[in-house]
Image (cartoon, rainbow, N blue to C red):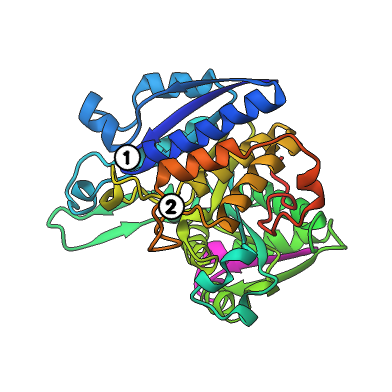
Amino acid sequence: MNIKIALLPGDGIGPEVVAQAVKCLQAVEETFAHQFTYTTELIGATAIYQSGVALPKETIELCNNSDAVIFGAIGLPEFDDNPDAKIRPEDALFQLRKELGVFANIRPVAVFPTLLDKSPLKESVLRGTDFVIYRELTGGVYNGEHTLVEDGSEASDIATYSESQITRVAHLAFKAAKKRRKKVTLVDKSNVLETSRLWRRVVKRISESYPDVELECIYLHNSIMQMILKPSRFDVILAPNLFGDIISDEASVIGGSIGLLPSASIGDGIAMFEPIHGSYPQAQGKDIANPIATILSAAMLLQHFGLEEESRAVVSAVNKSLKSNIVTPDINPKSKYGTNDVGDFIASNIVDTDESLNMNYENIGLGKSTII
Ligand code: IPM
Ligand code: MG
């Protein structure tokens, strides 16, 4: 298969982790006789410094002419620490999501058995954790009007949701649940927010077309508690934009490191794959960033194109690195391996063998979640 991939490494550790994902995809090309092309463009703070805008038109053009996008990370402290900045790296991501028409951000969360002791949660609480978050990506406060009164003493952010925005992502969540453990949990704040009440009404109605899938609706604050108390109770979590962003970061630490979780953003057109972590500027250039989240995002890309065996080969190689303790310092502080070593090890262990089907290739959810 030929796949044209746009690479948008972005800021901080973005370029380092994207480079490792490319190594792995190149190993997949060689092993399974595919042909992928990679073209890199600017985005985020790096783009602002080099071209004056966060999302240059060349970047949009490249994405529109590609089959898929791999995105690294965005944001730098000089922008975070300056509330008066006129142009912000993150704006590029919001604009790109709009350009690509991606409306569902899919974040599988599971626990690697080899890493049970790295989690802040007890093993007994952690066992059986395997859920996937479907985060709506186009609405809510992210896309509403943001205002600041002239004297700077008052601000507002408007959250808006339409029935159609809720419907399309909800259907994806129910379809995914049908193939998994048949449960959807809607996370909302319907005791306070009108948008949440709309979510509840629409999602309840949609659930009637999926009689074999159980729907539970819980408040955001409760979901946050439950994720710590009993994460294994979740199967598919459906959440509006902002709540989905918040709970997915919380969920990421359950597995032992935020550096492990991949994501896919899908819609009507081309899809985008990215680690859920941020740009971690403190680690930039130090060869310590964990590349696994981005490598697993590449595995989701392969799965998106129906390359199941190839995707499993990447996941197996990741598992091998974890089992062999070839990991970055976020997982093992004494590790002598860096970002590049881990990327090299995983790439060189991508093999075309049915072995991966027979072994218990750990429960990261990729094989079970539906991303297409
Ligand atoms: C994410 C990120 C972004 C978001 C930031 C970088 C604006 O946290 O993709 O989860 O909030 O959507
Ligand atoms: Mg986030």
- Magenta highlight range: 182-197
Image mark for residue 277: 2
Residue 83 can be seen in this image: yes
Image mark for residue 11: 1
Counting residues from the start of the chain, the first of labels 2 and 1 encountered is 1
Asked where in the image residue 42 lies, by quadrant, the reply is: top left
Q: Is residue 187 magenta?
A: yes
Q: Secondary structure at mark 1?
A: loop
Q: Is residue 185 magenta?
A: yes
Q: Secondary structure at mark 2?
A: loop
Give 358 or 306, whichever is nearer the viewer.
358
Question: Which residue lies at the image location 27% right of the left edge and 42% below the top edge?
Answer: 88
Give 358 or 230, whichever is nearer the viewer.
358
Q: Is residue 130 above or below residue 100?
A: below
Q: CA distance from mark 2 to mark 1?
A: 12 Å
Q: What is the x, y in percent for residue 255? A: 55, 65
Q: Amino acid at mark 1?
A: Asp
For the C terminus, the image quarter is: top right
Question: Which residue lies at the image location 44% right of the left edge and 34% below the top edge?
Answer: 19
Q: Is residue 311 left or right of residue 287?
A: right
